[in-house]
Image (spheres, grey):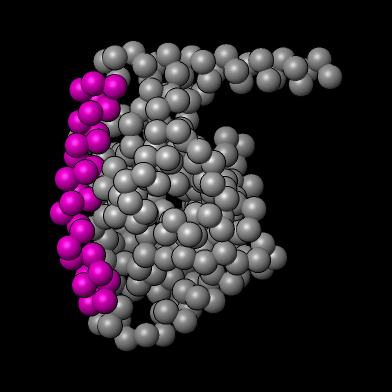
């Protein structure tokens, strides 16, 4: 597999022929989901899926953030239509037979948080935090989180995240089932790499069949949830105008923040 980095998604590896690092590469925007980033991420995952030498995929972010979700500042809006890149990305994350590891190197917001529930293993630095401000910006849960969050933490704790957008730290995320283990910040990526190296030494059939058994009873429910969520966004949320109003409020707040910085 080629490792030439795309513009917004950086690929590294496979280092030992089996581990592929995929890094969100928009550090100046908190690695938010520009349509090009989503397209490149989807393409990278599809290529990895078809590459028999890749057994483990590690998702992480360049810079201080893991991923801050939908880019509310970009004039290029992300499409949530069934069959388009975002819907297909979630479908690929749900169905891939590769071992998916998330190395949460910083804040994980929106999709940055929901994607964690689709990974097999999630490691986070101690000062990482996550929240899902869907309602605040006129959105609804995505990346199948309307089902994955319920399965991990039950209705009330899932509602606390999805309805209130409450911020939770790394240790609390671990107690909710969204993080497997919190690792020290120093040498964080190296430690995650060591876990992946250890996994890569296991018999490939054992890894494959174990993941299949773990996912067999949930895959269809997650795929159905992804379909429902994207339909609701396209057929009700976007036409309602709430998302656009939320975007305008966010952009105004960012302009005011920049104005205050320039005054100081």
At 17% across and 45% down in the image, what residue appears? 224
Residue 80, image x and y in percent?
28, 31
Quadrant where the image shows the C terminus = top right
| In the image, residue 19 above or below residue 201 | above
Q: Main secondary structure of the magenta part?
A: helix
Q: Is 100 placed above or below 72 here?
A: below
Position in image of residue 137 (x %, y %): 43, 24
Q: Residue at x 53, y 54 (%)?
A: 172
Q: Residue at x 68, y 20 (%)?
A: 257
Report the number of numbered marks: 0
| Residue 11 relative to residue 62: left or right | left
Residue 176 within the magenta-colored segment of the rendering = no
- Point 22% across, 70% down: residue: 212
Q: Quadrant of residue 160?
A: top left
Relative height, residue 259 to residue 8 (above, below):
above
| Rendered image quadrant of residue 146 | top left
**Horizontal side, residue 152 vs residue 209: left or right:** right
Residue 182: percent from left, percent from top: 57, 64
Quick one: quadrant of the N terminus? bottom left
Kindly tell me whether residue 54 is visible in this rendering: no
On the image, the x and y values in percent for residue 230 come to 24, 34
Give the magenta part as a residue range. Answer: 208-237
Q: Is 199 drawn above or below residue 135 in the view shown?
A: below
Residue at the outermost right position: 264
Can residue 238 be seen here?
yes
């Amino acid at each position: 597999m080629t490792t030439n980095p795309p513009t917004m998604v950086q690929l590294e590896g496979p280092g030992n022929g089996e581990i592929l690092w995929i890094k969100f590469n928009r550090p100046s925007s908190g690695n938010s989901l520009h349509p090009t980033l989503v397209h490149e991420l989807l393409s990278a995952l599809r290529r990895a899926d078809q590459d028999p030498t890749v057994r483990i995929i590690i998702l992480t972010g360049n810079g201080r953030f893991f991923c801050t979700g939908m880019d509310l500042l970009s004039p290029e809006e992300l499409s949530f239509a069934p069959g388009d890149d975002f819907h297909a990305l979630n479908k690929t994350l749900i169905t891939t037979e590769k071992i998916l590891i998330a190395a949460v190197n910083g804040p994980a917001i929106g999709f940055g948080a929901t994607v964690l529930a689709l990974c097999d293993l999630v490691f986070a630095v101690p000062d990482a935090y996550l929240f899902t401000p869907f309602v605040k910006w006129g959105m609804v849960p995505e990346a199948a989180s309307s089902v994955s969050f319920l399965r991990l933490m039950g209705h009330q704790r899932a509602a606390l995240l999805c309805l209130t957008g409450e911020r939770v730290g790394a240790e609390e995320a671990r107690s909710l089932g969204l993080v497997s283990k919190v690792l020290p910040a120093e040498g964080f990526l190296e430690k995650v790499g060591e876990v992946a190296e250890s996994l890569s030494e296991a018999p490939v059939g054992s890894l494959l069949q174990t993941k299949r058994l773990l996912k067999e009873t949930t895959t269809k429910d997650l795929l159905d949830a992804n379909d429902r969520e994207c339909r609701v966004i396209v057929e009700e949320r976007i036409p309602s105008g709430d998302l656009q109003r939320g975007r305008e409020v966010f952009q105004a707040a960012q302009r005011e923040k920049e104005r205050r910085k320039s005054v100081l």
